[in-house]
Amino acid sequence: MAKIKAKVVYSPNYDIQFMGMEKLHPFDSCKYSRAWNLLHKEFGKRLEEMTIAPSREISRDELLTVHTVDYLEEIKSSRYVAGAVELAFVAMFPKQLVDKHLLKPMRLATMGTILAAEEAMKGGLAVNMGGGYHHASTAKGEGFCIYSDVALAIINLRDTGKLKADETVLIIDLDVHQGNGHERIFLNDPHVKIMDVYNQGIYPNDAQAMRGIDCDVPLRSGTSEEEYLAALKLKLPEFLDSVDSPKFALYVAGTDIYSNDMLGMFRVSEAGILERDKFVFNALAEREIPFAMTLGGGYSQESYLAVANAVRYIIETW
């Protein structure tokens, strides 16, 4: 792989703003702009020159490469979406409002993951400052995830000829929750290899999806930073070196391993999250595996700071 040329994929329209009611959910749905704006204060034009925005949201036809017709009809129901994003009040609103204020930003961020994957295949590395909806499967949305952006990005690379059908793709899922959505989607696909490091004591505990994990690293609630990083530094190189000639990797970099996260139940500091991200970045770069990063979950007010730390490292390094 030639010298890495990193790209940042971002739009201010990634933010989900539902008349202030989004604040009732522990997920900071405006962390995308918080992180980018913080970085822009530091890097200004340099960041602008690295940043590209998706020109449109993902289309229905593109969604159908992964999701079913029935599912796309089902998510037109405000009640269904309310359950999937765990915001009961959403059920009270007309579907047009729900689509505009909630689903449209997710479709745009999903297109962002597709764009980041394409850019990474060209330049070696790209980060989408959104996405990572790893609980969404072919016919089900859950856990604040409606569209399976990671799966859609992989299928797009194949459909557009950027990846051959028999070339291997890696998913490195380090969100604190098991990535059951893409594990279900690629359960019978021998050319998608998945590593998942997660808290086995919390949602979703999806036993069927676990069959789709190639490198399974379940950890207990209360896992310390030292234990977490030791497990990662042991298992990630083993995983990468066990796969024959991987052509691309998608990294779900959830910040919900943070010690102050409301849901994660791990004890990893902000510095520990950055150490994790740097280890993943460098392990992939050293092996010349192009990769795209998505944000995944993060249920603390400091989540955007951890995101900014990772992107800052990318800007300063590549």
Image (tube, helix red, strand yellow):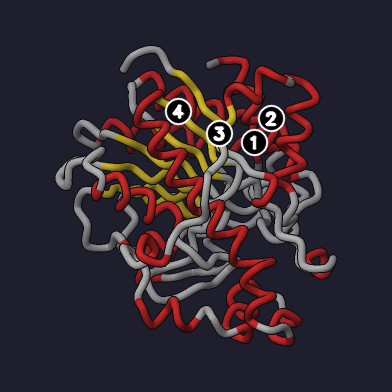
In this rendering, which labeled residue sits more in front, label 2 or label 1?
Answer: 2
Q: Residue at x 63, y 81 (%)?
A: 95
Identify the disc placed on residue 221: none
Q: CA distance from mark 2 to mark 1?
A: 9 Å
Which of the 4 image quarters holds residue 149? bottom left
The N terminus sits in image quarter: top left
Q: Which numbered disc, 4 or 2, marks the residue closer to the eye?
A: 4
Q: Is residue 139 left or right of residue 134?
A: left
| Residue at 65% over, 66% down | 102
Q: Nearer the viewer, mark 3 or mark 2?
A: 3
Residue at figure coordinates x 47%, y 54% from the top left: 218
> Which amino acid type is shown beneath numbered disc 2?
Asn
Q: Earlier in the sequence, mark 3 or mark 1?
A: 3
For label 4, the residue is 125
- In this figure, which residue is indicated by the disc labeled 2? 309
Q: Which residue is mark 1?
A: 273
Q: Nearer the viewer, residue 149 or 69?
A: 69
The secondary element bearing badge 4 is classed as strand
The reply to whether callout 2 and callout 1 are in contact (CB within 8 Å) is yes
Residue 172 appearing in the image: yes
Which amino acid type corresponds to the residue marked 3 in the rendered image?
A: Ile
Q: Is residue 226 above or below residue 176?
A: above
- The amino acid sitting under disc 1 is Ile
Which of the numbered marks, if any, corresponds to residue 52? 3
Distance Cα–Cα, label 3 vs label 2? 19 Å
The CA distance from mark 3 to mark 4 is 13 Å
The mark nearer the N terminus, 3 or 2, is: 3
Cβ–Cβ below 8 Å for labels 3 and 2?
no
**Helix, strand or loop under label 1:** helix
Mark 4: amino acid: Leu
